[in-house]
Image (spheres, rainbow, N blue to C red):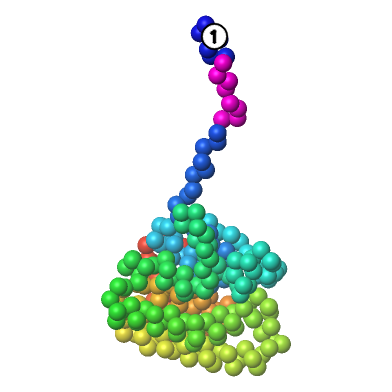
Amino acid sequence: MADAAWNASPILWPWPAPAPQVEEFVLKLYGMTGSGNCYKPALLMRQLGVPFQWIETDILSGASRTPEFLARNPNGKVPLLEITDHGETRALAESNAMLCYLAEGTHLLPDDRWPRAQVLQWLFFEQYSHEPYIATVRFWVHYLHKQDEWKDKVAEAMKKGYAALGVMEQQLARTPFLAGDGYTIADIALYAYTHVAHQGHYSLEAYPAVRRWLARVEGQPGFVPM
């Protein structure tokens, strides 16, 4: 009777699969090795101890112009930070926006209005007065090898690049870091392309305060080279 009762209740197969576990917070950084803009958020996450996955994306071979990538970032550029939070995935473009997002609530982005505004001032300076000349000339020379063909264009851009280095030199002669006494994301933003300016044939010989600052940045906890 016991056997008959057991057989009367068939076992259902397959067993119901357990609900998939959703990782609460996952960061993926789409970037190209050697890009200062891609290095910025990667360095910040290393220094904060935030785990992330690096997705190599070679813009020179068109990897940022595929339909799949353009669906993530219609601007077709790297870096791109993909943020999955409790199953919802969003994408954030622009390296300095990533720095602000990732540094929120840490000592690298002050809460008080004035010091925070000082950090933002340098982030805007980097994008408008520094990166278009330091980084762009580096790309022309180091990657495209156009230093001879585009000699006049390179020379004109370098005038503005040196002007940006001069602004940094004045500030760093007064304070150890760009936004004052403490290391912030302003330093990460401007370190990225300043430390490889020589690859665009810039010389930092006339900028001793900038050179000392580069060494201070490289001495920060968690620093990793590009």
Asked which quadrant contains residue 168, the reply is bottom left
Asked which quadrant contains residue 76, the reply is bottom right
Extent of the magenta region: 8-15
Q: Residue at x 41, y 62 (%)?
A: 47
Please indicate whether residue 137 sits to the left or right of residue 218 in the image: right
Question: Label 1 belongs to which residue?
Answer: 3
Query: 21 or 194: which is nearer to us?
Result: 21
Q: Residue at x 37, y 78 (%)?
A: 119
Q: Which residue is drawn at 52% across and 87% down?
A: 161
Q: Report x, y in % for residue 115.
A: 30, 79
Is residue 223 among the parts visible in the rendering? no
| Mark 1 residue type | Asp
Asked which quadrant contains residue 74, the reply is bottom right
Residue 226 covered by magenta stretch: no
Magenta region, main secondary structure: loop
Return the residue found at the far top. 1
Vertical position of residue 224 compared to residue 3: above or below: below
Query: 38 or 14: which is nearer to us?
Result: 14
Q: Which residue is drawn at 60% across and 30% down?
A: 14
Vertical position of residue 110 compared to residue 125: above or below: above
Q: Report x, y in % for residue 37.
A: 53, 72
Q: Report x, y in % for residue 171.
A: 36, 85
Q: Report x, y in % for residue 103.
A: 39, 67
SS class, disc 1 = helix
Vertical position of residue 156 compared to residue 94: above or below: below
Q: How many labels does the image show?
A: 1
Please indicate whether residue 104 sits to the left or right of residue 147 in the image: left
Is residue 127 among the parts visible in the rendering? yes
Classify mark 1: residues with Cα within 10 Å, few (<14), some (14-19) or many (20+).
Answer: few
